[in-house]
C-alpha cells in the first residue's frame, strides 16, 4: 500500500499544485454537470413537459373529453385487466425462479438464467410475432383454434400472453441477485428448528426480500401497462375491443387527434413518474433496513 | 451428491419444476415455432426475404443507427454517471432518479413526445430547423430515439463501476505528480472499461430492437427511414409469416451474438476485479 501522505515530492511543487488543480477541476466540474443537465433536459425533460403541454393545449374541457370516449375507456379497462392478470403470474414465476436459482446448485443453471433474461434481449416486435406464428390464422395451432372457435390473436388472450412474455423477467431479475446476496442462513435455521416450508417462506424469506419484490412488481406493472411493440403485433388494433392504452395513443395520433393522444399519454406518463417515485422510495427505505 | 441436495431447504422440485414449465411454455415453445418456420422456408425464399433491397436498407438503419446511438451513449453515459457518482450539486438525486425515465415511460409515449419536441414547429426542432438541421422524419430522428431508449443502460452499468474505482489509487497517482488527464487514462478508464463496454452493448441491443419510440419520429419512408422491426410488422400485416420469420431470424441471431458478448464482457470484468483484489 502506498499511503498518500508518504509520497515524496518537493514542498514547493505540492504547494503550487492544489490551487491550479482546484480551479481546473471546478471548471471541469461545471462543464460536466452542464453537459449532463443539457443532455437530459433535451432528451428527457422536454418530451416529458411536451406531453402535458400538448394534453392541456386546448383546455381542460377537451382533455377530459378524451376520457369520455367509450373507445378510450375500453382501452383503459383492457390495460388494467391485462396488468391484473399478468403481474401476479409473473410475480409467482419470479419468486419460484429466484428460489430455485438462489438457493440451489444444479446443472444447466446458467442456461436457465439466460432463458429468463431472453425476453429482455429480443425486440418487442419479435416477441409479439412469436405468438402470431403459434396462434395466428396460419400459425401452428391456428387451424385447431379456428375449428374450436377460440381466438387468441387479435383478441384479449393474445394481448395477455404477449405481455406475459415481455414482462416475465422483471420480478425474477430483481429477486435473484437479492436472494443470492442475502444468503439462506435464516431459512436453514427455521427449517432445522422445525418450521414448515411455506411458513419459512412467508415468515422468514418474504420479509427479507419485500422491498426488492415490491420494486420488481412495480417495474413489471409499468412495463405491462406500457408495452407497445409486442402487443401491437398481436392486437389487430380493433378500437374499443383490442386496443390497449399505448395502442389507443397510436390510433388517436394517426387520426391527428393530438390532444387525445397526449391526454392518454399523460396518464401513462403519470404512471411512469409514480413508478420512479416508488422506486426512489423503495431504495431509500430498503437502504435503511438492517 | 445429487442436484439440489447440499442444503436442508425445501422447494427445489416445486420451484425448479414450475420455472422450467413456465419458460418452456412461454419462451421456448414460441422460439421453436420461429426457428422451425425460418428453417422450413426454402433457401431461395429465405434469402429473397432477408436480402431484399428494403430489408438491406433497414439493416443499415437499424444496425448503423443503433451503433451510433450506442457510441453517443458511451460518451454521455460516462459523463452523466461520472457527474452523479462524483459530484455533489443541487438536483443530483433528482437527476439520478430521472435516468430511469426512458425505462419506465411507455415507448409509444416517448415516441410521440420526441416527435412533438423535434418536429419543425416543436420546442427544440424549431431552433434546429433554423440551423438547417431536420430531426423529425429523418434518420437523425431515428438515432435520437435510439439514444434516448439506450441511455439508462449505459449510465446504470457504469455508475456502480465508477463508485468502485479505488480512490486511493487515484489519489496516489495525483500525489505522485500525475496529471488529471493521465490519471483518467491510466487509472479510471482501465478500471471501468468492462462496465463501459457492457453498457455500450446493452444500449446497442436495446436500440436495435426498439420499435415504439422510433416509428413515430422516423416517418417510415421506404428505403430511407424504415427500421427492421417495422418491416417485420408490415410482413405480418400482409400475413406473410415466412417473410416476417426470416427477418426475425436475422434479428434474433444478432441478439444471441450480443448476449454472448455481454456474458464474455462480464466474465472478463469479474476476472479483472478478482485480480485487482489479490
Image (cartoon, coloured by chain):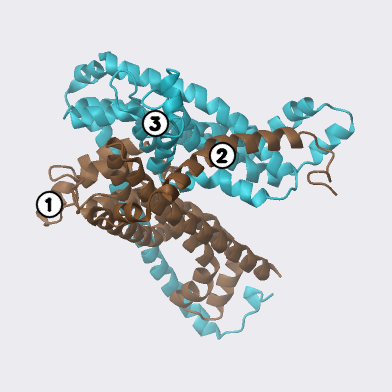
Give residue A252's position: percent from left, percent from top: 22, 27
Question: In the picture shown, does residue B264 fall above or below A216?
Answer: below
| A277 or B29, nearer to the observer | B29
Label drawn at residue A283: 2
Residue A78 horizontal/vertical position (percent): 39, 20
Position of residue B51 relative to residue A102, above or below, is: below
Within-10-Å neighbours for mark 1: few <14, some 14–19, many 20+: some
- Name the residue located 50 percent from the left edge and 78 percent from the top edge: A15
Question: Residue A149, located in which quarter of the rendered image?
Answer: top left
Q: Secondary structure at mark 2?
A: helix
- Vertical order, A289 against A160 (above or below): below
The residue indicated by pointer 3 is: A136
Pointer 1 and pointer 3 on the same chain: no
Q: Are marks 3 and 2 on the same chain?
A: yes
User: Dot 3: within a 10 Å radius of its alpha carbon, few (fewer than 14), some, or many (20 or more) residues?
Assistant: many
Lateral position of residue A130 relative to residue B21, left or right: left
Q: Quadrant of residue A19?
A: bottom left
Residue B150 seen in the figure:
no
Answer yes or no: is residue B111 visible. yes
Chain B is shown in which shade?
brown
- Residue marked by disc 1: B129
- Residue with the most extreme bottom position: A10
Residue at mark 2: chain: A
Q: Could you tell whether A136 is left or right of B8 in the image?
A: left
Which residue is nearer to you in this view: B35 or B183?
B35
Write down the chain letter for disc 3: A
Amino acid at each position: 500500500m502506498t499511503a498518500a501522505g508518504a509520497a515524496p515530492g518537493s514542498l514547493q511543487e505540492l504547494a503550487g499544485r492544489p490551487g491550479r488543480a482546484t480551479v481546473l477541476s471546478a471548471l471541469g466540474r461545471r462543464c460536466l454537470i452542464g453537459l449532463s443537465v443539457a443532455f437530459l433536459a433535451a432528451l428527457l425533460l422536454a418530451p416529458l413537459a411536451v406531453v402535458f403541454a400538448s394534453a392541456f393545449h386546448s383546455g381542460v374541457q377537451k382533455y377530459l373529453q378524451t376520457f369520455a370516449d367509450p373507445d378510450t375507456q375500453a382501452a383503459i379497462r383492457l390495460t388494467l385487466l391485462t396488468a391484473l392478470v399478468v403481474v401476479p403470474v409473473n410475480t409467482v414465476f419470479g419468486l419460484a425462479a429466484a428460489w430455485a436459482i438462489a438457493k440451489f446448485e444444479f446443472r444447466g443453471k446458467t442456461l436457465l438464467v439466460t432463458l429468463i433474461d431472453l425476453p429482455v434481449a429480443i425486440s418487442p416486435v419479435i416477441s409479439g410475432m412469436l405468438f402470431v406464428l403459434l396462434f395466428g390464422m396460419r400459425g401452428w395451432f391456428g387451424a385447431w383454434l379456428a375449428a374450436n372457435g377460440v381466438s387468441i390473436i387479435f383478441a384479449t388472450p393474445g394481448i395477455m400472453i404477449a405481455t406475459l412474455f415481455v414482462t416475465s423477467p422483471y420480478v425474477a431479475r430483481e429477486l435473484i441477485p437479492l436472494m443470492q446476496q442475502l444468503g439462506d442462513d435464516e431459512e436453514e435455521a427455521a427449517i432445522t428448528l422445525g418450521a414448515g416450508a411455506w411458513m419459512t417462506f412467508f415468515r422468514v424469506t418474504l420479509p427479507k426480500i419485500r422491498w426488492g419484490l415490491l420494486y420488481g412488481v412495480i417495474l413489471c406493472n409499468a412495463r405491462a401497462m406500457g408495452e407497445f411493440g409486442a402487443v401491437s403485433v398481436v392486437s389487430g388494433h380493433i378500437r374499443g375491443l383490442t386496443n390497449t392504452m399505448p395502442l389507443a395513443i397510436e390510433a388517436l395520433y394517426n387520426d391527428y387527434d393530438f390532444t387525445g393522444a397526449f391526454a392518454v399519454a399523460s396518464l401513462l406518463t403519470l404512471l411512469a413518474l409514480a413508478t420512479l417515485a416508488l422506486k426512489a422510495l423503495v431504495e431509500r427505505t430498503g437502504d435503511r433496513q438492517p | 451428491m445429487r442436484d439440489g441436495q447440499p442444503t436442508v431447504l425445501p422447494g427445489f422440485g416445486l420451484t425448479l419444476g414450475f420455472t422450467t414449465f413456465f419458460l418452456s411454455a412461454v419462451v421456448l415453445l414460441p422460439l421453436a415455432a420461429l426457428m422451425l418456420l425460418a428453417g422450413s422456408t426454402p433457401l431461395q425464399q429465405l434469402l429473397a426475404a432477408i436480402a431484399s433491397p428494403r430489408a438491406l436498407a433497414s439493416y443499415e438503419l437499424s444496425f448503423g443507427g443503433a451503433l451510433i446511438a450506442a457510441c453517443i451513449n458511451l460518451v454521455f453515459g460516462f459523463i452523466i454517471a461520472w457527474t452523479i457518482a462524483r459530484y455533489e450539486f443541487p438536483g443530483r438525486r433528482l437527476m439520478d432518479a430521472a435516468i430511469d425515465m426512458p425505462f419506465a415511460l411507455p415507448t409509444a409515449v416517448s415516441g410521440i413526445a420526441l416527435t412533438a419536441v423535434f418536429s419543425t414547429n416543436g420546442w427544440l426542432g424549431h431552433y434546429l430547423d433554423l440551423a438547417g438541421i431536420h430531426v423529425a422524419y429523418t434518420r437523425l430522428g431515428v438515432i435520437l430515439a435510439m439514444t434516448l431508449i439506450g441511455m439508462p443502460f449505459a449510465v446504470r452499468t457504469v455508475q456502480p463501476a465508477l463508485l468502485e474505482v479505488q480512490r486511493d489509487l487515484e489519489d496516489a497517482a495525483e500525489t505522485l505528480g500525475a496529471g488529471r488527464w493521465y490519471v483518467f487514462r491510466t487509472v479510471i478508464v482501465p478500471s471501468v472499461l468492462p462496465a463501459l463496454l457492457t453498457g455500450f452493448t446493452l444500449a446497442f441491443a436495446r436500440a436495435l430492437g426498439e420499435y415504439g419510440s422510433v416509428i413515430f419520429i422516423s416517418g417510415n419512408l421506404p428505403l430511407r427511414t424504415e427500421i427492421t422491426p417495422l418491416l417485420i410488422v408490415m410482413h405480418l400485416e400482409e400475413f406473410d409469416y415466412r417473410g416476417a420469420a426470416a427477418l426475425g431470424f436475422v434479428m434474433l441471431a444478432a441478439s444471441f451474438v450480443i448476449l454472448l458478448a455481454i456474458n464474455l464482457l462480464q466474465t472478463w470484468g469479474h476476472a479483472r476485479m478478482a485480480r485487482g483484489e489479490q
